[in-house]
Image: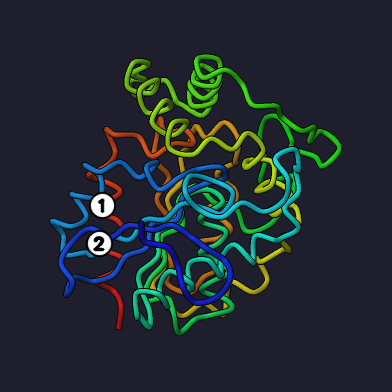
Amino acid sequence: MPLTTTDDVRIHFEVVGPDDGEPLVLVGGGGTQLVEWREPFCDLLVERGFRVIRFDHRDTGLSQRFGAPEDVDGGYAVQDMALDVLRVLDTLGLASAHVAGHSMGAIMGQYLALDHPARVRSLAVLSGIPGLDPAYLRGPQYAATAMVPQRPLPRDVAVEQFVATQRAMHATAFAFDEDAERAHAALQIDRGYEPNGFWRHISALLRADDRLPRLGSIRVPVTVVHGAEDPGLAPLAAELTAAAVPGAELHLVPGMGHRVEQALWPLYVDLIATNARRTA
């Protein structure tokens, strides 16, 4: 089982694609495991010449846990989680890589490009925000006072909870395959169920600062992709992010919510690959 070896933080990761491919790290959203980046999606990226690297966030899957099972705060910030990407790269002996991050992963990607620019070749900001301004948010707001410890649920109940969450992030312009989502939920639960992992990630996100004033210092190619129908994060966040980064490209996708929809995989792959080719 491949785990990072650079220090006492253990992050599980997997790699697909040729050793001489362009390294690309896929960084998932809050509470997600590496399997959230589906294998067929990764295969499409490999076909475009990438060596694709996926990893389980801390407090998910096969990666290290932080705190007792009932803890909703792991004591770390999203900036610390961004360093997990560098742990993976260092373990693989890679000086830098392209980065594509979704939701919380997009925020981690921003921190990497800002604080460790030599390690990032290009950045795809997928359904991300540049800070915690309420203007970026839609729907229910997560607050520290609302974070009550979650007890482990029976497997079938946990599966249905997962499916309900995915349905809430979905947009009706695209098909929602409940059976496929249910099978995927079971895979994640069987692989590494951590009821409070998501809340620990929310705690970490609440420690993030406003990055918008700093985004102008990013010099790598950036593409910003956002669902026009995202139920949680307003397109304004994407518009301001793209406007702040010199040369960034903005893509607002009609009918898309807060998920990397299977129907849009070719679009995502093309945008990531096109952006990577802009690397000087």
Classify 111 as above or below 144: below
Write down the residue under mark 1: 269
Secondary structure beneath label 2: helix
Q: Residues within 10 Å of mark 1 (few under 14, many from 20)?
A: some
For the residue marked with disc 2, what is the amino acid?
Ala
**Along the viewing direction, whichever of 116 and 211 lies nearer the viewer:** 116
Indicate the position of residue 263 as horizontal and vertical percent values. Answer: 27, 33
Indicate the position of residue 159 as horizontal and vertical percent values. Answer: 49, 20
Residue visible at 43% across and 34% down in the picture: 188
Q: In this view, does 104 lie to the left or right of 37?
A: right
Whether residue 250 is visible here, answered yes or no, is: yes
For the residue marked with disc 1, what is the amino acid?
Val
Classify 196 as above or below 184: below
Q: In which quarter of the image is the C terminus?
A: bottom left
Q: Which mark is residue 273?
A: 2
Residue visible at 18% across and 57% down in the picture: 46
Q: Is residue 224 left or right of residue 98?
A: right
Residue visible at 64% across and 66% down in the picture: 79
Residue extending furthest toward the right: 145
Could you tell me how many numbered marks the image carries? 2
Secondary structure beneath label 1: helix
Classify 240 as above or below 222: above
Q: In which quarter of the image is the N terminus?
A: bottom left
Cα separation between marks 1 and 2:
6 Å
Residue visible at 38% across and 71% down in the picture: 122
**Along the viewing direction, whichever of 86 and 61 lies nearer the viewer:** 61
C-beta proximity under 8 Å, tags 1 and 2 = yes
Whether residue 223 is visible here, answered yes or no, is: no
